[in-house]
Amino acid sequence: MTDMSSGHTAQIPRPRSSEPTGPGLTSAAGLTPAPGLTAGAVLTVAFGTTVAMWAVGYIGRLPAVMLPAAGLLGAFLICLVGGGWYIGHRTGAGWKAGALAGGVCGLLNLLVLGSLLTGSEPNQIVPSALWWIPGSVGISAVLAAVGAAFAGRQATRGLDWTAGLAGVAVVATMLLLAVGGLVTSTETGLAVVDWPNSYGYNMFLYPLSRMTGGIYYEHAHRLFGALVGLTTLVLAVFLQRVETRRWVKGLGWLALVMVIVQGILGGLRVTGSFTTSTDIADMAPSITLAVVHGVFGQVFFALLVALAAICTTRFREGPAAATRENAATDHTLTAALVGLLILQLVLGAIQRHTANLLAVHIALACVVAPLAVLVGMRAWGLNDDEPLLKRIGVGLASITGLQVMLGMGAFVVTGAIGATHVSKTVEVSVATAHQWVGALMLGCSSLVAVWSRRLLSKG
């Protein structure tokens, strides 16, 4: 391996992985790409398939979409078979790989299956649950096994499954941010009056038939939050088993603490205090906590993006950073961009929840947007020998351009410059997209900051 700063060849040790294995799993490394079935492969594909199914289900039941039941079922089947095919193709472990991943996926989907198994009274389980629960897990395992069997037994190449699991957590959080953005845009954050229950029901047993109107937006947000929390928990525990870098293990625990705090903030935003009451008179909704909840979620997202990058094999085992004269400037600019973006997100959250500080939000955007483009163009133009930084730089500049256009669109459709004649759907869509792309901008800036420090040295 070549040290770019000196031109000399240096041997970088490849630490052995301690990725846990279970029945039928080989001891292939999770941190070093190698074919074979590992716990990391099963968890990554299982959680990834679950996230895909939840995304399809959520979008399919949006009031503006409302896919027929047959269409949703077909999409779910495609997700399961596709997930099975993917793990079979990547590991070469055949149908057993698909069965394991599908079974875990089926267990995860019990988080939403409860909405179909509750009776007429809160938390009353219908007798058919005795068959539904094992049946759904078994069917998921069979469908994924079929997909894996069609993929054949010849592995193409191994993947970095630890980074893959972190990447799934990133995608799940991206979806959660979009779902949360819709809650704010539709002003349905208080559609469910109690927490952690939902109208007296256990959150996971609230009937699907009652998830209509604003309740659908708010309750789905809670369920997605539970999925992100569970994904983060599994990622944090998994890192303790396979990672040798103590500080990365610490980041895993930090992410877990943050997602727990975020869930509590979201609940207290509704109730104002810890209570099991379902009486709206006992609640004290907090706009301040709504703002904190919105911003803290995006900071959590940026941490997961950075963690996913840090978990990659290249970050861990790649060549030493190249010495660059401009590295110190890049490090300073990326840090400043991340800090200013967080401040801008605070102003944006205040504007969305209270309709205040719009002028300050716009003024800071006139600073943040050019800085983001500058950081992106420097990453693209000054690193011809680092294609990764070049791609991230182009991505940051592109996302910034899109965000500026969405900001102007939101300014118009929300009536900030007078009466508008757009539908509520357009208004909600543009406002939510503006909030969501802002989160992507922060995530991409976090990515540039992390990789510039890993690949570029001040010398």
Image (cartoon, rainbow, N blue to C red):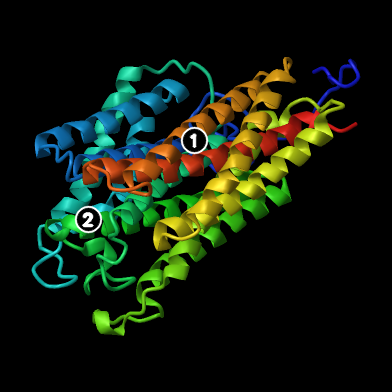
Q: Which residue is drawn at 19% across and 70% down?
A: 123
The disc, 2 or 1, on the residue closer to the chain's N-terminal end is: 2
Q: Is residue 433 visible?
A: yes
What amino acid is found at the position of numbered circle 2 in the picture? Tyr
What amino acid is found at the position of numbered circle 1 in the picture? Val
| Foreground pick, 276 / 12 | 276
| Foreground pick, 164 / 291 | 291
Per the image, the residue denoted by label 1 is 404
User: In this rendering, is residue 296 above or below 82?
Assistant: below
Q: Are marks 2 and 1 in contact (CB under 8 Å)?
A: no
Give the x, y percent position of residue 300.
54, 52
Q: What element carries label 1?
A: helix
Q: How far apart are marks 2 and 1 (CA)?
A: 30 Å
* Image side of residue 212 versus residue 366, left or right: left
Give the x, y percent position of residue 294.
46, 57
Residue at the farthest front position: 418
* Image side of residue 158 versus residue 271, left or right: right
Give the x, y percent position of residue 232.
49, 52
* Image side of residue 123 versus residue 321, left or right: left
Residue 228, label in figure: none
Q: In which quarter of the image is residue 47?
A: top left
Q: Residue at x 48, y 53 (%)?
A: 358
Mark 2 or 1, closer to the camera: 1
Per the image, the residue denoted by label 2 is 216
Give the x, y percent position of residue 373.
62, 30
Q: What element carries label 2?
A: helix
The quadrant the C terminus occupies is top right
Q: Residue at x 39, y 49 (%)?
A: 176
| Foreground pick, 246 / 335 | 335
